[in-house]
Amino acid sequence: MVGSPAGGARVRSSCRWGDVREAKACTRSDPRRRAPRALAALVLFLGCLVGAYSTLGEHSGKASARPGPVYVFPIPGSQFATTQTQISFRGLNVSQLGGVVVTGSSSGLHQGPTLSHSDGKGASFVPKNPFTPGEVVTVRTNVDVPGGLNGAFQFRVAYPAGPNRPSPFSFARRVPGDVLRFRSRPDLAPVAIRVLKRSRREAPGNIFLGPHVGPLQNGPMILDRQGQLVWFHPLPGNHFAADFRVQRYHGQRVLTWWQGIIRLGTGDGEDVIYNNAYQPVTAVDAANGLKADFHEFQLSRRGTALITAYHSVFIDARAVGGSAHQDTLDGVVQEIDIPTGLVLFQWDSLDHVPLAGSHGPLKAPYNYFHLNSIDEDADGNLIISGRNTWSAYKVNRRTARTMWVLGGRHSTFAMGRGTQFAWQHDVRVRGRGDRLVTVYDDGGAPFVHNSRGLTLRLDLKHRRASVARQDDHVPPLRALFEGNLQRLPDGHDFVGWGQAPYFSEFDRSGRMIFDARFADRNVSYRVWRFPWSGYPQTTPDVAAQAKRRRMTAWVSWNGATNVAVWRLLAGPSPALLRRVGRARRRNFETAITARRALYVAVEAVDHAGHVIGRSATIPVH
């Protein structure tokens, strides 16, 4: 039950606000819920106008055919809408929606535009003014809304508890060789990587990670198969990058990541998309007054963005030993229409998952659920991971209702021996029929068991779960938070061990065939392996220094993946340069020596012998 922060007064009611008939009864019995009579009369009059307009349109032949069921967000009966929520309708085009009358029990009648979703299959009413915390909002339409009555439905606005403070993250303790330094790019200082184990059987592809405890710079970085730097994008100040990977957008391979600040285990930032020239394409923000969280940024099969957000609200948590005004984090899943920024789907953990299922510590803010991954199942519905409930939830993408629960205290499945995960991350589904589910099982916070990569087989008919595969690091690791498991196309598993500073690859039999770690105690929320070709639109960078009769030039090109050879050009003036040396590209920075000259430049040559880039001409120091 929601508690009011104002004056310490509690709002207590047994009313359910999803059904309009029940809501009317509640309003009559509770004087705090009564709307002024004049307002009620106005709403009824406007509702009649909407109905008359729609009927006139049908008789005139100008209106579109009446749509089938229309699904809405916030869902009918939601208790935790934000004060800035939009009201989204899915399953019709904007011309079929007609008039929408939105009335707050305290804030009154709301005006605002109704904007079409870019796919033409929905629209969102965007109020010009915010709603009032604690009020009940009534929405009246002329369409069939499951959970409503004659097109009308209600939801409640939560009492916001305000943003959490930024976490006091400190950079990793300095150790020898903890960062990389480059003569040609002195502005870059990414964390160093140590490769501990390699094999010819490794899967192809680069490695993508987002170290975020320095020790000097944070940001997304790409490594080659040898663990050498390919691209690094430093972020300013206390900003972090997370969930850095390759995805597809409009049929093109793109780089995606979250960037922002971290607040007590949640993120406050934005999701970004870059092309293969390392140029920004677009940014995706959370909607309804929320900020994008770092735990998930997935581009869906239909070109939308599935993202996480957190909403800090006051609730009555006395049933689990909390207070009547417990500051609690509501884990929010949003599907965002990227071109418009409008909401296509929203799921709030507090509407669907009881507090009693949590293993999280009861403190402010109460992070009872800790939403940390979203995945699309083969049928288009969603798989949502709740770290602090030790569970994954299959959720209907139209109604937001729970279809099944895997793990935890309320599992739909009988959990076989060795199947129960704890404090998990990154739950993904594989295949059709009986499902394979991959989980990065942290196992510790507090400690339950060693961290592992876990693949479960779900018998959907008999509702049983069994272990299909397990990936164990040698020696064993205990990660308190973060991490992921990626199933590669060849059947190998690539595991980022989260708070443990390692990332590893396992073959089909579970043997560890690749292992690497940060030089210091760094953290990357996830680590991925993907094929990647980058073509920066910048020019190569070069620095040069002479000593007696010889000189050395250092050259790099941040993000270029198709350089095979560097050619060194030198001469007495910028206009009189000739080729004086060459070297194969092996690492991020390549050194070339030659006879001393006054000016130098370099050319980048690909495997076909074509010049694909040339640096500026610089004087030799």
Image: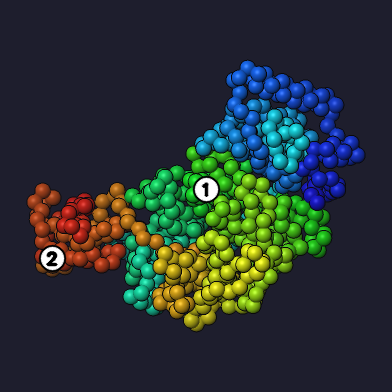
Q: Mark 1 points at which residue?
A: 305
Single out the residue that lies furthest toward the bottom.
475
| SS state under label 2 | strand
176 relative position to 113: left or right: left
Q: Residue at x 42, y 51 (%)?
A: 248
Please state which of residues 1 and 234 is positioned toward the viewer in this rendering.
1
Q: Say if 84 sits above or below 494 in the image.
A: above
Q: Which residue is drawn at 47% across and 77% down?
A: 510
509 relative position to 33: left or right: left
Q: What residue type is labelled 2?
A: Ala
Q: In which quarter of the image is residue 27?
A: top right
Q: In which quarter of the image is residue 390?
A: bottom right
- Mark 1 vs mark 2, CA separation in Å: 51 Å
Point out the image quarter for the C terminus.
bottom left
Q: Can residue 338 be seen in this view?
A: yes
Q: Which residue is drawn at 50% across and 42% down?
A: 338
Q: Say if 200 sits above or below 344 in the image.
A: below
18 relative position to 255: left or right: right
Q: Position of residue 37 (x, y in %)?
A: 85, 26
Mark nearer the viewer, 1 or 2 = 1
Please state which of residues 608 and 394 is positioned toward the viewer in this rendering.
394
Q: Residue at x 74, y 25 (%)?
A: 47
Label 2 Cα crowd, 10 Å radius (few <14 / some 14-19 / many 20+): some
Please state which of residues 560 and 374 is positioned toward the viewer in this rendering.
374
Q: Where is residue 150 in the image (x, y as percent from the top left)?
A: 75, 33
| SS state under label 1 | strand
Q: Is residue 262 visible?
A: no
